[in-house]
Amino acid sequence: MSGAVRLLLVLLALGTLVAIATAPASAAQYTNVAGLEPWSAESNYMSLAGYLRWMTFREQGVWLSMPEAQRIVAQQQMEAE
């Protein structure tokens, strides 16, 4: 196998791994914040998206982006209705 083909295969494999690792997850994989009151003691005086980001970092060691956290909070709230 030539070096160029080998390099192409390695890059393709890395691209696939990155795509899998960064795929958005369902709201069920995160702390459910739908029943919490934003800006209160129960949400550590944070918005619900901010509290979800903080809890996800504590539990999984990963920071969610604010738009992703807002999407998850909205999904959790829709599921709670």
Image (cartoon, rainbow, N blue to C red):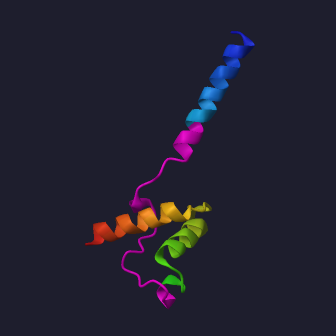
Where 11 falls versus 17 (above or below)?
above
Quarter of the picture containing the C terminus is bottom left
Dominant secondary structure (helix, strand or loop) of the stretch shown in magenta: loop
Between residues 62 and 48, which one lies in front from this camera angle?
48
Residue 69 position within the rendered picture, expressed as x and y whole percent measured from the top left:
49, 65
Is 10 positioned to the left or the right of 19 in the image? right
Where 12 falls versus 30 (above or below)?
above
Residue 37 position within the rendered picture, expressed as x and y whole percent measured from the top left:
41, 85
Give the image quarter of residue 10.
top right
Residue 3 magenta-highlighted: no
Q: Residue furthest top?
A: 1
Give the image quarter of residue 78.
bottom left
Q: Residue at x 60, y 34 (%)?
A: 15
Quarter of the picture containing the N terminus is top right
Residue 23 magenta-highlighted: yes
Is 20 positioned to the left or the right of 73 in the image? right
Start-end of magenta stretch: 17-42
Give the image quarter of residue 61.
bottom right
Q: Residue at x 36, y 79 (%)?
A: 35
